[in-house]
Every structure is written in C-alpha cells, then in structure tokens.
Image (spheres, coloured by chain):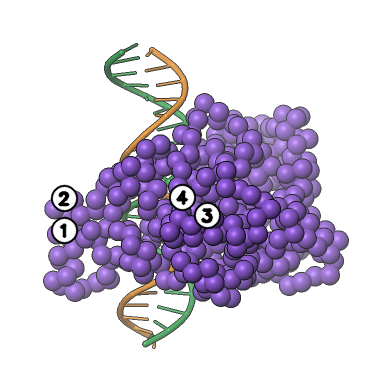
Chain colours: A purple, B green, C orange
Amino acid sequence: MCLNVLPRKSLEAFHLSFNTWPFLDQDKIVNDTPPEEFYRSVVEDKGSTFELHAPKPRDRSQKNNNLDFGLPQILPTRTLKRGDDEMADGNGGVECNQGVGLAAVSSLATVSNMGRQPCCDKLGVKKGPWTAEEDKKLINFILTNGQCCWRAVPKLAGLRRCGKSCRLRWTNYLRPDLKRGLLTEAEEQLVIDLHARLGNRWSKIAARLPGRTDNEIKNHWNTHIKKKLLKRGIDPVTHEPLHKEAKPEESSSSPDDLLPESSNNNDIQENDGIVINSDDNARSPTENSCSTENSLLLDSICNDEMLLNSLWMDEPPLADPSWNKIIPPAAEDTNNDMGYPSWEDNYTGLSDCQDFGVHDFGFDCFDTIELSALDILEMELNR
DNA sequence: AATGTCATCAACCGCATCGAA
DNA sequence: GTTCGATGCGGTTGATGACAT
C-alpha cells in the first residue's frame, strides 16, 4: 500500500474518524501522532491490512445506554463476534449458489440472455453476515482506491460479494464518519419532526442527522419511535392524535399540508406548530422541556422557507445572508478541536482526488451552509 | 435447565431513478 | 426516444440474544 495514494485530507479524515471503527485496536489511538505516521502505524505496518480486534459483544441489557465510549455499543455481533477472526474465510455466511433455484436462474440467464443481468454474478457470491476478514478487505480497498464503481469493488478487493452488498456494508457500517450507539433523545425528536414533514423518506431524514444511516434510522423508527408515539396516542403515520375527538383543540392537517408547495411561510410555521404541539401534548413535562430547545432549533431551520424547501426538494438552498445569524463559522465543529479539517473538508479532498461518490457519504444534498447549519443544530442538540 | 416468544438490527430484495450509449 | 447498466431507496427478512414461562 502506497501512502501517497491517499491525499493528506483523507489521511486526516482517517486519523480523525479512526475511533469510530469498532474493531480496530483502540490502544492505537494516539491523538498526537501526525496523520501520516498514524496511518502507517495502523495500516502499512500490518502489510497493507488492518489489524482487527474483535469488539465486546453487544450488551442488550443496556438498552438505553447512550454513553459515549468512542467504542460502539451496537455491534454486529454476528459478524464480529469474538473468534470470528478464526473463521476468517467466510464460514459464517450462507452461500448464494446453494440449492437448485439460483443455479437454475443463473443458467437460464446465461442461456436465454434475455432480461436484465443480475447485479452480480450469483455463482460464488456470498450472502449473509460479513466476517471481519471481509470488512478488512473492503476497508483496505476503499481507503486505498476510493470508491469506484461498486460492481468492480468485490473483484478488485478480493471479495466474494456482490457490489451492492459491499456498498451497503460500507455505507451502513464501515463508513468512518458514522456515529455509533443508539439515537439520543434529541436525535429521536429530530427524526420524529422530520418524519412528520418528509414521511418515510429515510435517506432524506438521515441526511439531516450526520453520522446516521437511513437503515439505522428506519430500524430505530420501527422498533422504538413508532411504539413511543403510539404510547403517546399519536399516529406514527400521520403524526396526529389517534383519537381526534379527545383533542378537539388540534386543528386537522394532512401530511400533504406539510408540503412546501405552499409558498406561504406562515403556513409552514403553523404546520410546524401542529406537528410539534400534538406531540408535546402527550409528552411528560420533562420530555417537553427537553424537546423545547429541539423544537426551537428545528423551527429556526424549518421556518426558513428556502431551507425547508431544500429539505423537501433535493436542491440545496441558495445562500442567504440572514442565515449568518444562526450559522457561525464551521470551525466551531465540536469534533474539530484538534484543528483538523471537518469531515466535509476531508471528503471534498477525497472526492477531488479519488472519485468517491458523494452520495455514498450521505452528503449529496448538503452544501456548505446546510452542513454548517447542521453542525450548529447538532451542537445544540448535544448540549 | 429447557423451551418458547419477543425485540433488535444487519443484510437482502426488488423496484425506482439516473445517466450514458 | 429507447435501452441498459449502475446505483439508490424503502420494505422486509432472518439470525441472534434477551426475557418469560
């Protein structure tokens, strides 16, 4: 592995985000080590492979434990259980080409040559949980070569996986900018509010929660938030009270009303109020006080018509000088106290040099202003 | 201790979308 | 304008651990 393959910015990103990878030896975190040296110590000295260490198994008894360990609390126990290193060559997965069905499909496709080709050659393609060894290979490959076309990744990285599976594994688990652990209460509330506006557009929602994936949010919604809302007497689909007659003061608003087609800023504010208030009505005083700040922060973004439109559409908002009031310089990034560039900066460097797909990092619809706004939002929520 | 049930979440599947030819 | 491959997205599945009986 050649160090100069990587631009300095990506080295810095690697250095900064190192502790988000669950399976690397935490003893190697040396904040004072320059990125190049650090990278060498972790990657190069291991003969172009990462030194992987199995994490502690996830402790399900600590369901609401959101302590920030640096180490994740949610670990893929099936993939990275202690001892998985020994079964490094894929004993843990299910072979896709087992059984008659797929073989038949595959041969059919070969013979008839009709219809779309499968996204990958099904023969010999492995399915099921990823092993530590596979993770190693994928990380190594992407850090060395960046993200080229996913279809080519498995072949080039020496993986018996389809490209789709590689992309998912990277974006949902291995990506270095991912946060670990359960969603905080603040994040949860943000998800609820965003869901009220965007519906099941998980990728859009995830884009507003840096470090969280759509899959993670979707799962959290289905397993936790839905139940919480139902307990509060709120329909998780419409975000309205389940028994409207019980809350006559609530004005009705369909989810469609929340669309930003309305160019009236006041309409949007009203809708925001409805969503948040209906939620708050069923919430305990403690929760209310906790969420008030969130709501204000969310409103400060969502009441801005341009920004809200950009939430709904895929277009980034145009720069508006008035936003400067709520958007201090990005240098205040809390993760940035070492003076390194933000991940976004790093990412820009990566994409410049290595043909990374922006979308795969979840920043596709971000521009600098939005990112700054989100940094602030996140800082406030974490406070 | 053994068995059944539930909760969780990583991974898969299939459709949608986009862009290049 | 059409076709086709690559990728993204959202719904669903299934393996696993925790908990209940």
- Identify the amino acid type marked 1: Ala
For the residues tagged 2 and 4, is the chain the same? yes
Establish if A7 lies above or below A194.
below
Please tell me which of labels 2 and 3 falls first in the chain: 3
Q: To which residue does mark 4 refer? A: A51
User: Whole-Å distance between the Cαs marked 2 and 1?
Assistant: 7 Å
Q: Residue at x 47, y 64 (%)?
A: A142
Q: Which mark is residue A99?
A: 2
Q: Give the x, y percent position of residue A358.
A: 55, 68
- Decide: few, some or many residues near mark 4? Use Cα within 10 Å; few <14, some 14-19, many ≥20: some
User: Would residue A101 be seen by someone viewing this image from the given angle?
Assistant: yes
- The kind of secondary structure element at disc 1 is helix
Q: Are marks 4 and 3 in contact (CB under 8 Å)?
A: yes
Q: Are marks 3 and 1 in contact (CB under 8 Å)?
A: no
Q: Give the x, y percent position of residue A182.
A: 58, 39
For the residues tagged 3 and 1, is the chain the same? yes
The answer to whether residue A188 is left or right of residue A323 is left
- Identify the subunit bearing mark 4: A
Q: Are marks 2 and 1 in contact (CB under 8 Å)?
A: yes
Q: To which residue does mark 1 refer? A: A103
Q: Nearer the viewer, mark 3 or mark 1?
A: 3
Please tell me which of labels 4 and 3 falls first in the chain: 3
Q: To which residue does mark 3 refer? A: A42
Q: Give the x, y percent position of residue A101.
A: 16, 54
